[in-house]
Image (tube, rainbow, N blue to C red):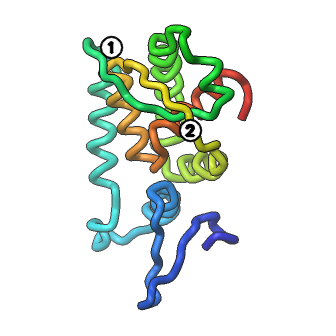
Amino acid sequence: MKSKFHVCANLDYQGRLDISSKREVRKFQALVEPLMHPSMVRKSTRNKWKEWKARWLQHQRLQDGTCRTSIYLPYDLYDALRGKGYSQFLNCLLSEWMDKQWAENVVEPSKRYRWLLKHDDIPKGYHLLTPRFRADVKARLDILSDATGLERSELVVLALRNQLGTQ
């Protein structure tokens, strides 16, 4: 699986495929779901996609209220953001970036698979920031995390790296 499809998986003691990471599961699902027989609907995320798309549309409008969220960034990004009104900056950046990623890379399975492959090497963050996300940004960040298997912090790192022109 790893060499051909770039999905990290193991075989359990009964010879079944064991994919433990949520990101790897989403990559695998993006590959096989278009080919799945309707009898396999319980293994599919098709119904979840309907829910995610409806929630995405619902949260595209600016919403009142904020939610403090913990994110972990690599030091270079942490150092660039801390103490500089980063909540407002992240709200503006993420709102635009997430809409673009959702439309161009996430909704269609083949594009989602390629997008996830492209971002297999997201640096792990250890430096905590606690931005106040607008309710709509936090909701879409959670949907994008569920749909891609990436953690919120990883999505923020991708958006920041994209903004700074470093991949």
| Label 2 neighbour load within 10 Å: few <14, some 14-19, many 20+ | few
Q: Residue 133's x, y, as percent?
A: 38, 20
Q: Is residue 133 left or right of residue 167?
A: left
Q: Residue at x 62, y 50 (%)?
A: 114
Q: Residue 117's x, y, as percent?
A: 63, 52
151, 34: nearer the viewer:
151
Q: Residue at x 38, y 46 (%)?
A: 146
Residue 30 lies, with reference to residue 105, above or below; the image says below
- Please identify the quadrant where the C terminus is shown: top right
Q: Residue 56's x, y, as percent?
A: 33, 32
Q: Evaluate if marks 1 and 2 touch, with contact meaning CB atoms under 8 Å apart.
A: no
Q: Residue 79's x, y, as percent?
A: 64, 21
The quarter holding residue 37 reads bottom left
Q: Amino acid at mark 2?
A: Tyr
Residue 41 lies, with reference to residue 63, above or below; the image says below
- Please identify the quadrant where the N terminus is shown: bottom right
Residue that mark 1 sits on: 62
| Label 1 neighbour load within 10 Å: few <14, some 14-19, many 20+ | few
Q: Amino acid at mark 1?
A: Leu
Circle 2: element type: loop
Q: Residue at x 58, y 65 (%)?
A: 7
Residue that mark 2 sits on: 126
Circle 1: element type: loop
Disc 1 to disc 2, how far (Cα)? Answer: 30 Å
43, 132: nearer the viewer:
132
